[in-house]
Amino acid sequence: MSNPSADAVGRAYIDQARRKITACQDRIVHCLNQLNDAQIWWRPLDSMNSVANLLLHLCGNVRQWIINGVTGTHQSRNRPQEFAERGPLPREDLLKLLSSTVNEADRVLSGIASAQLLEPRRIQGFDETVLSAIFDSVAHFQGHTQEIVSLTRMQLGAAYRFAWTPQTREQGAPTRQ
């Protein structure tokens, strides 16, 4: 087995980050397309977040950590407002915001050279590298995506439509008797 170059490893890392964010976006869109505007803004408890609040928060985080943080540009973010918002911003507006944020982040990520991954950045009061900023933001995006899936399933119950179901034994499909 050959030893990949640092450049190849860096490129693979960036490409994987791009795929993960896009896959999360697809899962969020799948959920939002099953919910009406009232369900998107529903909170299990007043102290908890709605799907819409999580989406606003994800867009704020990606903008701060990847779009602005990685590029080293300044951005003013009102993080508390992401959670305080009660809407109702319509689903279409939220989907446009998500799409534009993910597309912009993808453009930033596609322009990163492997050599930049270890460059220092100061983001939200933390000393990071480009690599750690991407790593943390992607993990954050994945975690809240699963929370959005859970909130959607909580509301829809048996009516929830899964985006994917296992088809083979290897994938985990039930064995047929």
Image (cartoon, helix red, strand yellow):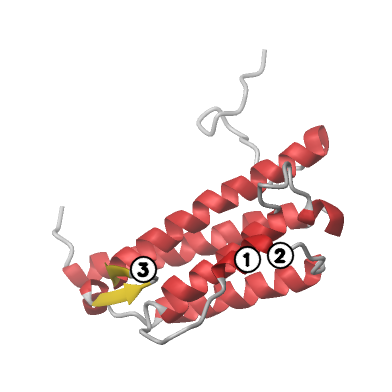
Against 112, residue 164 (above or below) is above
SS type, badge 2: loop
Residue depicted at x 67% and y 47%? 47
Against 67, residue 132 (above or below) is above
SS type, badge 1: helix
**Pointer 1 residue:** 82
Give the Cα separation between the discs numbered 2 and 1: 6 Å
Rendered-image quadrant of the C terminus: top right
Image position, residue 121 (x, y; %): 29, 76
Sort mark 3 into few (<14), some (14-19) or many (20+) by Cα contacts within 10 Å: many
Quadrant of res 165: top right
| Furthest residue in direction bottom, as rendered | 73
Question: What amino acid type should be assigned to the residue bearing mark 1?
Answer: Glu
Say whether residue 76 is visible: yes
Q: Are marks 2 and 1 in contact (CB under 8 Å)?
A: yes
- Which numbered disc, 1 or 3, marks the residue that appears first in the sequence? 3
**Pointer 3 residue:** 14
Question: What amino acid type should be assigned to the residue bearing mark 3?
Answer: Ile
| Furthest residue in direction top, as rendered | 177
Sort mark 2 into few (<14), some (14-19) or many (20+) by Cα contacts within 10 Å: some
Disc assigned to residue 85:
2
Q: Nearer the viewer, mark 2 or mark 3?
A: 2
Q: Is residue 109 left or right of residue 81?
A: left
Q: Is residue 44 left or right of residue 65?
A: right
Labels in figure, total? 3
Give the Cα separation between the discs numbered 2 and 3: 32 Å
- Which numbered disc, 2 or 3, marks the residue that appears first in the sequence? 3
Quadrant of res 136: bottom left
Quadrant of res 29: bottom right
Question: What amino acid type should be assigned to the residue bearing mark 2?
Answer: Glu
